[in-house]
Image: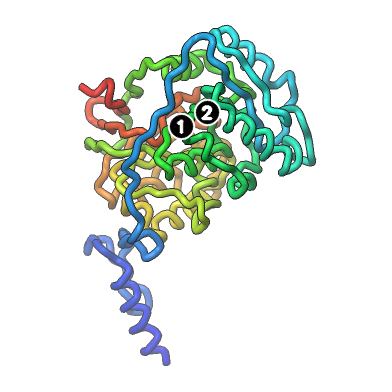
């Protein structure tokens, strides 16, 4: 029985691995375990078709209508007032979802209220962009109930991060571009990030770059940018709203997650075959976590990303920290890691 188990386990490990490095092999109970194993794309996504469509909503102009919606945690009027005033100063007319200041336990209203509040703004063809009030939890709950037919006839920018990742994944899978960036709560906490968001929304696309650091991996890749909050990618894994990473560049960020939890979520992406489908990686802000007895985060990321032989942009200031450089998800970008780490949109390609 023991010999049979060891043999079947060894066969399983061999079948799962697609490449390995012999010099990093360890032996456990006579089973050869490759610590740099890279799993082949699994049956979960091996027949998944690459998203090749790229629908970009129209850029904004002064006088356009935009909306503020809330589909996650509740928010007070005072928490969005400063951001709302900034939008008005941009020359925009600001509408508010019917449930914006509602509260039902932790949520911005009941599920029905949150669905209705967002759906109304999605359906309104005069609304050119939707800014989300805040994150928290609840966005994934509304996904099965949303109707995108009128949105498709008049696409609009979806702007937010954290829990709003649920909407980003859904729309990016459908071929629509969205913006991962500041939300109304704390909208003005970093003026540079807000100005960058304004530039994008009004059609002035610029490259996004930082000084290269030792955790970056050199290389160049051009592909569709997808991703968002790692916890949401993990939560939607295996659902009808699972992220399509095929031939894409993956962005991840998170807050308040212990290092072992980050490892667990990356393991899920690896063992589902999603990491093997990507052409590059952008690691955003990971704050508020704890290391405990685990590896530091940079080593955890290296464990999963280094064997992929793709460029890695490490440390983009996007996420839950003070700075939140906005990026366009669903858009084809060039990831260039050389003298510096940079994201180049097609319009600004050199």
Quadrant holding the N terminus: bottom left
User: Where residue 123 is drawn, which disc sits there?
Assistant: none
**Vertical order, 136 against 321 (above or below):** below
What is the count of numbered marks? 2
- Closer to the camera in the image, 336 or 164: 164
User: Where residue 178 is drawn, which disc sits there?
Assistant: 1
- Closer to the camera in the image, 36 or 170: 170
Percent across and percent down for residue 23 are: 23, 61
Of callouts 1 and 2, which one flags the residue occurring earlier in the amino acid sequence? 2
Percent across and percent down for residue 69 are: 64, 29
Circles 1 and 2: CB atoms closer than 8 Å: yes
**Vertical order, 18 against 274 (above or below):** below
Percent across and percent down for residue 342 are: 30, 27
Q: Is residue 293 visible?
A: no
> For the residue labelled by badge 2, is the local secondary structure a helix, a strand or a loop?
strand
The residue carrying mark 2 is: 159
User: Which quarter of the picture shows residue 345?
Assistant: top left
């Amino acid at each position: 029985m023991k010999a049979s188990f060891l043999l079947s386990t060894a066969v399983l490990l061999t079948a799962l691995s697609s490449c390995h490095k012999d010099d990093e092999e360890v032996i456990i109970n006579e089973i050869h375990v490759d610590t740099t194993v890279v799993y082949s794309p699994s049956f979960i996504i091996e027949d998944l078709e690459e998203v090749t469509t790229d629908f970009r909503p129209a850029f904004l102009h002064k006088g356009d209508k935009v909306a503020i919606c809330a589909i996650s945690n509740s928010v007070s009027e005072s928490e969005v007032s400063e951001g709302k005033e900034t939008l008005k100063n941009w020359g925009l007319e600001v509408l508010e979802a019917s449930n914006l200041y509602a509260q039902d336990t932790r949520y911005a209203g009941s599920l029905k209220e949150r669905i209705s509040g967002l759906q109304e703004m999605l359906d309104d063809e005069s609304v050119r962009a939707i800014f989300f009030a805040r994150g928290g939890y609840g966005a994934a709950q509304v996904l099965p109930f949303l109707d995108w037919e009128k949105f498709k006839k008049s696409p609009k920018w979806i702007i937010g991060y954290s829990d709003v990742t649920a909407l980003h994944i859904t729309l990016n899978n459908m071929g629509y571009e969205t913006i991962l960036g500041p939300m109304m709560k704390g909208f003005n906490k970093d003026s540079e990030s807000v100005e960058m968001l304004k530039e994008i929304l009004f059609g002035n696309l610029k490259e996004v770059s930082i000084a290269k650091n030792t955790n970056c991996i050199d290389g160049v890749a051009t592909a569709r940018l997808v991703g968002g909050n790692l916890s949401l990618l993990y939560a939607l894994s295996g659902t009808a709203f699972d992220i399509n990473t095929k031939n894409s560049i993956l962005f991840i960020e998170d807050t308040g997650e212990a290092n072992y939890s980050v490892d667990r979520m990356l393991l899920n992406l690896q063992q589902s075959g999603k990491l093997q489908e990507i052409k590059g990686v952008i690691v955003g802000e990971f704050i508020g976590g704890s290391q405990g007895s685990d590896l530091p985060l940079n080593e955890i990321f290296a464990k999963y990303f280094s064997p992929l032989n793709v460029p890695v942009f490490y440390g983009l200031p996007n996420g839950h920290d003070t700075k939140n450089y906005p990026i366009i998800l669903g858009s084809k970008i060039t990831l260039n890691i050389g003298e510096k780490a940079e994201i180049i949109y097609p319009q600004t390609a050199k």
